[in-house]
Image: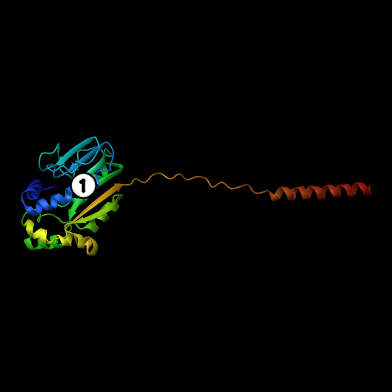
Amino acid sequence: MMYPETMEEFADWLSSTELGQDLLCREQAFFDTAVSDIFGFRAVQLGLSDYDFLACNRIPWHGYAGLDGQPDVVCDPAYLPFDSKSLDLLLMPHALDFTSEPHQVLREAERVLMPEGRLVLTGFNPFSLWGLCRLARRRGAAPWNGNFVSLLRVKDWLQLLQLEAIDCQFMAYSPPFSRHDWLARCSFMEQAGSYCWPQLAGLYAIVAVKRQRGMRLILPRWQRARPARALVAAGNERQTLNRTQGDKTNDE
């Protein structure tokens, strides 16, 4: 179950704080690049419907679902009201961070995606400066009251659901300072972090593809017929028998 009040707080935090706006710019840049070359017929953004992360996608039908903002479809991400194998693209910005059933949310994502459909998600990394700040603040307010599911756990869940992670990116290496000028002073950490400690970023993003195992035809193993030695042996026997009968005729 998703907590609508928590997701609303997080959406407000993104727009009302300098740290949130900095994070929002980074995520918007990632989604714009990630979805630009994905094609199909139906795309859905699950959560944070006030921010259009599908803006650069060329799929003709876009939908927005969730419990925050003003979505087209009001629903819990753990129980999606979409048909199985009906979506070509599903975006989940921080959907796993603000739900009590993150594994169930991924199950629903796998169910509604078509074979070879794309899942694009973002989440907070607990093994980072952002994770340390979350522990220090004791989950007081958004975004620190989120789950912060680790990247390894998410990848394990994806693998169990036959969702293959084809791309993984990291963002936000700077400490989560609340002021923009302090963030600007630590901008050098963004470039250094991508080379020195990529997996310690405050945010990770995953692009996954739904793989569906096809049937494998079991064909008969045809072999060339070997010559029947028994027939040759029978022929020799008849030839021997003929010689015997000829000897008897001569004796008579």
At 52% from the left and 45% from the top, the residue drawn is 220
In the image, 49: left or right of 40?
A: left
Residue, disc 1? 31
In terms of depth relative to the viewer, which is nearer, 230 or 142?
Answer: 142
The amino acid type found where label 1 is placed reads Phe
Q: Give the x, y percent position of residue 83.
A: 24, 37
Q: Residue at x 22, y 64 (%)?
A: 197
User: Observer-nearest residue: 167 or 2?
Assistant: 167
Q: How many marks?
A: 1
Where is residue 11 shown, x and y percent of the image? 9, 47
Spot occupied by residue 60 in the image (x, y as percentages of width and height): 24, 35
Residue 200 left/right relative to 69: right
Compare residues 223 and 182 and report the one nearer the observer.
182
Task: Please name the residue shown 73% across and 49% down the image.
Answer: 232
| Whether residue 30 can be seen here | yes
Vertical position of residue 99 compared to residue 112: above or below: below
Classify residue 115 as left or right of residue 22: right
Residue 69 position in % (x across, y down): 10, 41
- What element does badge 1 sit on? helix
113 versus 150 height, above or below = above
Direction right: furthest residue: 252
Residue 53, compared with residue 177, is above or below; it is above
Of 37 and 6, the residue lying toward us: 37
Relative horizontal placement of residue 45, taking residue 11 as reference (left or right): right
Label 1 neighbour load within 10 Å: few <14, some 14-19, many 20+: many
Residue 134, can we see it? no
